[in-house]
Amino acid sequence: MRLPDSFYSTVRARLTEALHHRELDGFLASSPADVAFLSGFFYIATERPVYLWMPAEGDPLLVLPHLDVEYAAQQGVTIDTVSYPEFPGVVTAEQTLAAALSGRRTRRVGFGAGLTVGTLAKLDAALPNTELVVTDAVAQLRLRKFPEEIPLHEAAARICDEMLAAGRELITEALRAGRELPREDEIARHVIGYGTDRMYADYDLVVYTTKLAGGLVYAGPNSALPHGLPTRRRVQPGDTLILSLGAAVASRFVESERTFVIGEPTAEQRRYYEADREAQQVGTEAMLVGRTCAEVNRTCLDVLRGHGLGEYIRHRQGHGIGLQNHEPPWVSDGDDTVLADGMLLSSEPGVYVPGHAGYRISDTVLVTDAGPRRLTSYPRDLEANIIEGVR
Amino acid sequence: MRLPDSFYSTVRARLTEALHHRELDGFLASSPADVAFLSGFFYIATERPVYLWMPAEGDPLLVLPHLDVEYAAQQGVTIDTVSYPEFPGVVTAEQTLAAALSGRRTRRVGFGAGLTVGTLAKLDAALPNTELVVTDAVAQLRLRKFPEEIPLHEAAARICDEMLAAGRELITEALRAGRELPREDEIARHVIGYGTDRMYADYDLVVYTTKLAGGLVYAGPNSALPHGLPTRRRVQPGDTLILSLGAAVASRFVESERTFVIGEPTAEQRRYYEADREAQQVGTEAMLVGRTCAEVNRTCLDVLRGHGLGEYIRHRQGHGIGLQNHEPPWVSDGDDTVLADGMLLSSEPGVYVPGHAGYRISDTVLVTDAGPRRLTSYPRDLEANIIEGVR
């Protein structure tokens, strides 16, 4: 599942350009997503720091805790590596980094805005002759996906779509057999298990990310809380049901979310579903190169407002997706990022009616010069998403 | 699963004292663990900030994204709440916070070292008349667990121990039935499913945390990588197998890890196992009030070195556990924290022999004035952890 060397050399060349432009001698990466993006080393974020030094000129360097050295080798990481014994340790990660960088040009070094205040203080102490400055050099590079990354997102999208089908099938089977219907938490476990299985079956080395396959499942009134956890409530005929699923291949994320109705929908369910479906369609088609995120979001949510559902809006249309499940840009008020070829976004307007249910349809959408392209393709129309035991 | 009000009022009183001592007008919490600790509101950490204002005098205030307001109410959070529409939004979270604090005393405000540089810049801009200073006021309060928290950790410990038993049983059953043995990833899913089920069965409202129940499962050579992921390799007779499991009740974490041998152990397996078992026993008994973390760690790891296994050490003895799976203090070189009544620590020395296998036994240990008390109690001796189909 390692990306080709061409990807890393292209990224390296683009970063070098950005560093020169910002008059930086290098970039110090320390978040799992940035480190994975720049080096192909995937790791579990703990208190043990990982630092990746990406100089404007010269060779990169990876600073790892001793216990991860063999794991990095297993992943095929070829960057020069130094390790520190343990956290916090007598010789710290920051001191190890400083010693390894001694003699290299580190007058002015950039870091990402996600660095913590505590870590910055440690780096400042270990590198007294270095000016550490916040930079968006790597964040900007990650905004538009590289061609080599797209097949990984597409692979994750296929798994997500199959997870939706697996969740639906679990309910259909129970209806057909006349058994009691599964609980929300059972459906969640089933689809997550399905997705994880697929990933292990398809790839030799499954690398760590924040979540290989994940999902929230909520039905009936519980689905009106966009951030609730699945409960032990059994789904039941008449329920509105949201399957909110995600998967990542080589930490390249995708999400795919659908709303289902168990049995014949009521007029109320049809009204909310169709309004959300229309907003999602209009909002997705609006994801055009040259538009701003805020404009696209407004176009999308205006459909819901036009249907008199403004009071049931709880969130923006969507967010960027990449090496993190949520990342910039934000398809939201307040984000004036201009959409460009290669950006990958969720399109997921929702309608949340307290006490009744929630409705959300989400696709992962690639912005291209030829128009928006949905990577996820599970059916979106209501008739296809009515779950019945008899077909 | 909400802690009694007495817990929150005690914490509040202790925090007020700490703030006065540090001449701070208040503390601004923004990490899920700090917010949950101080308010009982549990949430999924995303890019949408949550701020909890805990003043030295006056009423606390919670700043939430609009979409989480109903979720907070469902959790029984009674602190005054203001919400901002969305992230990033036209009116940001930081501006919403600043407006709500206007007129209150916020001359000098503390925040934790885990705040990111980017967030600090936004807060600085929104609160121009406030001096924002890093403080360990809340980190210090979280070092020693409160009496009300212990039963939650104990409940998590029971679930962890049962998860170990469930994993072992899955293998035993297959051996007895003469079926092929399960894969590492199947065992992991089975035990995580078991733990999650138990949690949902035991509690009405399962609140969000980074992981309800989690586990790494690795056998044979794969177990020699402390941070590897489970693979699709089937466990097999002769394998050394590590089940590294964790669970959290109301985000109060515990971990319980055991090493098993499938079938009769070889002399080599016995040697490594017994050495690790002895180090864990000695190290756990050394967790006494008044000792430093570094001393305890040295005592523990010296047992392995004494057995000539120094080259197979990959990590420290352990780490603090609480609202996070890993948190201070660190039972490691470089941490001179003096152990005190109420601290909760993992005791988990490991032996990792490349190409052969890894051995690790972990308990979650409460430091008390009466000596160390293990919350996890799954058997630790080798004879008990030999997995055979016939008993």
Image: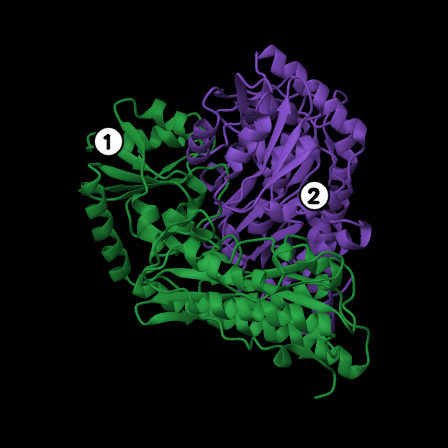
Chain colours: A purple, B green
Discs 2 and 1 carry the same chain letter: no
Question: Is residue A218 positioned above or below A279 on the image?
Answer: below
Q: Chain of mark 1?
A: B
Image vertical order of residue B32 relative to residue B312, above or below: above
Residue B179 badge: none
Among the 4 quarters of the image, the one containing residue A330: top right
Query: How far from the left and from the top, in percent, is residue B192?
Result: 61, 64
**Is there any visible trace of residue B201 in the rendered image?**
no
SS of the residue under disc 1 = strand
- Dot 2 surroundings within 10 Å: few (below 14), some, or many (20 or more)? many
Crowd rating for badge 1 (residues with CA inside 10 Å; few <14, some 14–19, many 20+):
some
Let me know if residue B171 appears in the view: yes
Can you give x and y, in whole percent of width and height, for residue A7 in the image? Answer: 77, 28
Give the residue type that dot 2 points to: Ala
Residues at marks 2 and 1, CA–CA distance in whole angstroms: 44 Å
Q: Position of residue B68 (x, y in %)?
A: 43, 45
Mark 1 lies on residue: B108
Of residue B365 and residue B184, the one placed in the foreground of this image is B365
Q: Quadrant of the C terminus of chain A?
A: bottom right
Q: Nearer the viewer, mark 2 or mark 1?
A: 2
Furthest toward the bottom, the residue is: B391
For this rendering, which residue is in front, A57 or B115?
A: A57
Quarter of the rendering containing residue B262: bottom right
Residue type, numbered disc 1: Arg
Residue B242 pos. (x, y %): 65, 65
Decide: is A199 above or below B285.
above
SS label for mark 2: helix
Q: Which residue is mark 2?
A: A72
